[in-house]
Image (cartoon, rainbow, N blue to C red):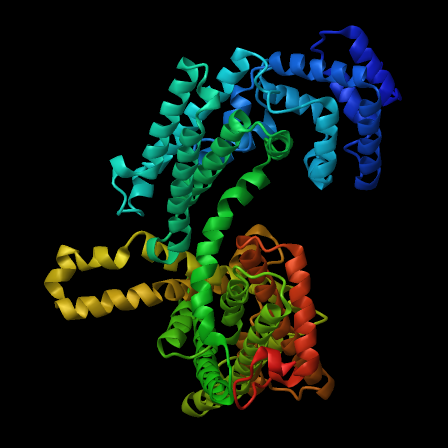
Amino acid sequence: MNVFKNMAPKEILERIEKDGATTDPAYLIALIDESGILSNKKNALLRIIAITDLLNQEQHLASALRNYLVNLYNAYDPLILYTDAGILPGHGFFTEAFKLIRYKILPPLENKSGAQYLVRKVFHNKKDYRNFSNIDPDLWQRLFEAIGIDGDVLKWQHQSLNYLLNALMILSQRITAIGLEPEVISKLPEIEDLHSPFFGLYREVQQYVDRFKNDNSYISNNEEDYRQILVMCSQCEASIDELHKHKDKYGISINLAYYMVRLEQHVRRLKTILQLIQLNDTTEFNKTLFGFTGEVIHSENKKYSLKKHLNDNLSLLAYKITEHTSLKGEHYRTVDRREYYSMFKSAMGGGLIVAFLVILKVFAHHLNLPPFGEAFTYSMIYASGFIVIHLLHYTLATKQPAMTANTIAASLDGTDKKDNVMLKTAKVIAEISSAQFISLIGNIVIVLPAAYFLGWIYFYATGSNVITGEEANHMIASLHPFKTGALFYAAIAGVFLMSSGMIAGYYDNKVVYSRIPERLKQHPFLKRIFSERLLEKLTGYLKNNLGIILGNFFLGIFLGSAPLLGKFFGLPIDVRHVTLSTGNFGLALQSSISHLPTGLLLEITIGIIAMGIINLFVSFGLAIYVAVRSRSLNASLMRNLLHSINIYFRARTADFFIPPKKKVDAETAT
């Protein structure tokens, strides 16, 4: 039973004063819970102000609370809290992920003597970290001042200071170990081991800690050493920034992303611990303590969260993937009429290739292969066709969104909420929209008549149709938007389209990170059969095109294998790709033995248009979501962007479908 239930904060403080040197966390838990200072934001503000006023008026209660917090702090070992809370462990990405999954099933045994256990007991509500951060730091500052927390709060006893100094040593050692990992050093070849800023930081911290422990007067004359450690921290951060800025040059892997995140966290934490030791100004000290407390509460509230682990690590890898696809996406913008008509011609070529794919798939179907053989054959037909479309510089419209969504996100990199910046991004979206519109039209206007006439050519050459009348009627019926799952299957196709774009970016990154072109140039067998000039051209082509070729290959596998997966698992899994479906419709029209009602033709036409819209929106939506998450763009930025798109659309609606004859500046356009 909770003896503090419905007790006023003043009564709890009086109990703390009465019980003297207690180290029972129940008092602090009750004070936070019953006072409601971490409840909803409006009430919390008023209640923090009320407690602050109470402590300022009754100094004996403030003194009792301060002594209680000191005793409570000294009763638990804070070292692991300083060095581990909110910092990724050293197990590696996959090891940590599997560990968190195991902990979901069987939680670990807790160390009740550690300060982390105390934090979890006191801030037991899973939303406490959010409520804590929502409060104005100035209010916490005033509360800390009322309690009497100042720059000596963590140094009341010699052992407390030792914990902070030991934390500095542990953090600096870890930074050195991570910074000298072969995978990190290989991406920073200009840094020699002994001259590495990570190693230099360790030397400076060791000197600082040794002097602190051996000289009691060092705290008053160590400003120069303190500043030197901050300089080394800045150099470490500069090396990490180098990895960030040149990911197109170095590439990135999950392991390297993990190292980068851990390095950033350790350097940031080392600076925090150093400030807790060094700062004497109460305001600055409390500001640092407030930030550290928020990190710790967040860490303990999310300690076993698999979602947080994935978000902390995969954003860097997602950034790299989307960065590469954004480079490809630059080719899918039309800034003027010349590029617009060029895109239309390219899309017509893509539509013609798809018409042949439709015929080849029917031939494969008539082979009556077993399910796996049929799925494999369909996959290879589609994959080969999509790769041919790329090699001939043709366009498949629905492939664009996975590329262009990242171009939009990339245009927002390093921006703020200024209207002119957002209008420029809105202009980019208009250019992409017109390119997607005309490429979709180009695909459709060719694939339907091309499939129809290819069917006639086959009929005149052989005396029989490519498909029977019954098969034609079944093919038409499968495209009905209301009587079948065609629109849902179009959404599944959109997921596959987005996935293929992400795969393209992944392999583009893989080419850079693993230095595949350079390794191929050194391959003994290739050097024997190719001249140096030819090998240079081959490796250069693979560097620029391997990702998108493999993306097309996997798209073919996805589209060709989905029906087999649906049958195997007994699930409604199939695909409806607008260009392929339009080709099927054209072939079915040629082979149909009965007159099709006008109403049915209209419904199928509406269905095909709806499939195209769903293909594009699902693919584009998922891709822009991944791209935005990878760049950590906040919600307010996105709202401002949508507002700018609305302004640009109202001012220049036609630009979203047909670009202007000449390039238009975003500011003058509106």
| Residue closest to the far left | 528
Q: Quarter holding the C terminus?
A: bottom right
Q: Position of residue 152 (x, y in %)?
A: 60, 20
Left or right of residue 513, residue 581 in this image: right
Q: Position of residue 117 (x, y in %)?
A: 62, 20
Q: Quadrant of residue 285?
A: top right
Q: Quarter holding the N terminus?
A: top right
**Residue drawn at 71 percent across, 27 percent down:** 145
Q: In this picture, is 41 found above or below 548? A: above
Looking at the picture, tell me which residue is in the foreground, 378 or 314: 314
- On the question of residue 550 being in view, the answer is yes
Q: Position of residue 589 (x, y in %)?
A: 58, 85
Q: Position of residue 381 (x, y in %)?
A: 41, 70
| Residue closest to the far bottom | 460
- On the question of residue 367 being in view, the answer is no
Q: Quadrant of residue 254?
A: top left
Looking at the picture, tell me which residue is in the foreground, 61 or 418: 61
